[in-house]
Structure formats: structure tokens, C-alpha cells
Image (cartoon, rainbow, N blue to C red):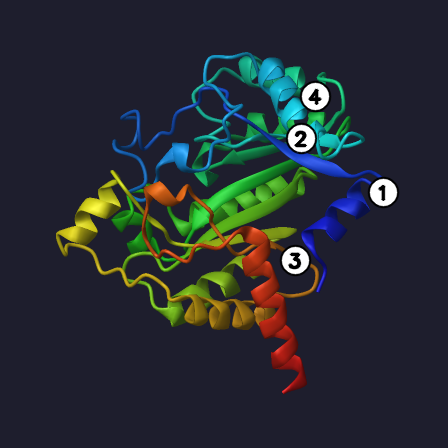
Amino acid sequence: MITYSDYLNKIFPGVKVQKISVNAGFSCPNRDGSIGTGGCIYCRNDSFSPSYCMTGDPVGMQISRGKEFFARKYPAMKYLAYFQSYTNTYGRHLNALRALYEEALNSPDVVGLIIGTRPDTLPQNVIEMLGQLNQTAPVFVEIGAETSCDETLRLINRHHTWQDVCDGVRRASEAGLHCGLHLIAGLPGENRGQILRNVDEACRLPIETLKMHHLQILRDTPLSRLWHEGKVEVTPFGLDDYLDLCVEIVRRVPEHIVIERFLAQSPPSLVEAPKWGLKNYQFTNLLQNRLLQDTTS
């Protein structure tokens, strides 16, 4: 199985790269009233935003702070500017978007961009602009799909469809962008069979990477309230069950698609369920051992 590090090594041969998250002050169309309000029912953005990402600070300043954060361990590292928070192709004029991305690329030691976005906020002119930047430095587009089931997408307040995902991925891939898809395992009402169907549907698309994590119920989110009130069907994963699911997913994903991760890691004080108390590397070790047992049994 090709690891995400192997994947990056092919794109940046001989160079070690590290993501630096950037919060450029974007919103989402399901937050600001464009197509809905409240955002995705499970979302709490501060659960994954690093301390050096402060909305309102220039992109270059955030990158400089991120480099200081990582330089203690990795002094010779190059960086990918990761526009992570909210929907990073939404609500700005094309020239304003380009200026933000170019500010990141012009920062010392930044060798590429990762743009986190939704499939319905990728108009063709934005894709073409990203394709032009991709001629200078690799541009990775990380599209939040979450599920292939339109009923679930409505339930979690996404306000886009699976067809929107297919269309966005196809056009991004045709423009030469490095395209990845994001899924969540264990969304309300979705059982193991539906989760595996989501993976199968994702793997039919022209993607290079797949990022997946288990659903976390975070404090002060609509999902938390609905769960406590018994208005949504959510059964938080046990660790062993999730490891078994991940083994099955590894079996199903074709070799040309790289699985970037399987775990979400939010501050423990924000997590209501499931509470595993694991770091990413600890979960990875458990999964690798489970995969080894699976191949030798």
C-alpha cells in the first residue's frame, strides 16, 4: 500500500514537505444564507484549526508563524500552504482568490497549495485559475463529499448532491489538478454497508487521494443537540469496529488511490463521543498491526 508520504515524495522528489494550515477568513454557502444557515451539523471549525491560524492575519504572516512552529523539529522542511478552514473557493472575486493563493506561493519555502472546498463552489473560471497556478507549483484540491448518499447530505445540512461531487472532481481532474476526496464514516443513519458504498463510489472518480475519518460528536454543535434529544440516529464507533472497517476499506481502495488518513483528532475537551484517547500515530500503528494480522491469518 502506497502511503501519503510516498505520494508526496513522487510529486516532490528528494524534498520533505509539511502542511501549514491557513485561515483566510472564508465562509460557507450553507452558513451565510446563500443556500442555507448553520453549516454542517457536525462542524466545529476550532476543533482542527492550529493555534497559529488567526483569522484576520495576512496569509504570509500565518505561514511564517506556521514555519516557526514546525522548524523546531524540521529545520530543512518545505511547505504546502493548506487553505483548510471553511470553503476556500467561495465568496471572493476571482482576482481576490488568485491574490490569496499567490501570496501563499510567494512565501519562502512554500512549494505548493492545498485548497479545501466544496464541490458546488468550483466554478469553471476558478478551476481554470487553479490550473494556471498548477503550472508553477502543484495545486491539490481537497473536495468535501462526506457521503455519496443524497439523503444523508440533506440530513447533515450540506446542501449539495453527489452529482455535484462527481462534476467537481471531473472538471478539477481534467484541469490537471491533484484531486482528493473527503469522506466521513458513521454519519447519521449510515451503516457499514453505506459507508463501504461511499468508498466504492468515491473510487470510481478520477481522484488521487482519499481522506476519511470517523464521525466525532463535538460539544456545542447541532449534531450534539440532535443526538442528545434522540432526533438523529448515530452510533459512535468502538475502536475495534472502526479498525475492522478500515481494514475492509484498505482492501477495496485501488492501488492508484492513496489513503491519506482514517482518524479525526480534536481536542479531547470538545469530544463527546467516541472517546478513544489516541494520537494519529497510535491509531496508525494499531491499523498496521491489524492489516499485518489480516494478511498472515
User: Which part of the image, by quadrant, shows the N terminus?
Assistant: bottom right
Report the side of 173 relative to 34 (left or right).
Answer: right
> Residue 139's spot in the image, x, y percent?
67, 33
Whether label 4 touches label 1, CB < 8 Å: no
Residue 273 rendering spot, x and y as whole percentages: 32, 54
Label 2 neighbourhood size at 10 Å, few (<14), some (14-19), many (20+)?
A: some
Query: Quick one: SS at disc 3?
Result: loop
Measure the alpha-carbon separation of dots 2 and 4.
Answer: 18 Å
Judging from the image, what secondary structure is the residue with disc 2 in? helix
Single out the mark in the foreground, 3 or 2. 2
The residue that label 2 is drawn on is 70
> Which residue has dot 3 on it?
257
Residue occupied by mark 4: 105
The residue wearing badge 1 is 13
Query: Residues under labels 1 and 3: Cα distance?
Result: 19 Å
Residue at x 64%, y 35% (from the top left corner): 19
Q: Residue sitting at 38 percent across and 47 percent down?
A: 161
Q: CA distance from mark 4 to mark 3?
A: 26 Å
Q: Which residue type does callout 1 highlight?
A: Pro
Q: Nearer the viewer, residue 201 or 184?
A: 184
Residue at 43% in and 31% down = 86
Lower sequence index among marks 3 and 2: 2
- Vertical position of residue 29 compared to residue 101: above or below: below
Tell whether label 3 touches label 4 (CB within 8 Å).
no
Kindly report the distance in space between the C-alpha atoms of the residues bearing marks 4 and 1.
19 Å
Residue 102 on image: x %, y %: 66, 17
State the residue at coordinates (73%, 34%): 138
Of residues 104 and 289, the one drawn nearer to the viewer in this rendering: 289
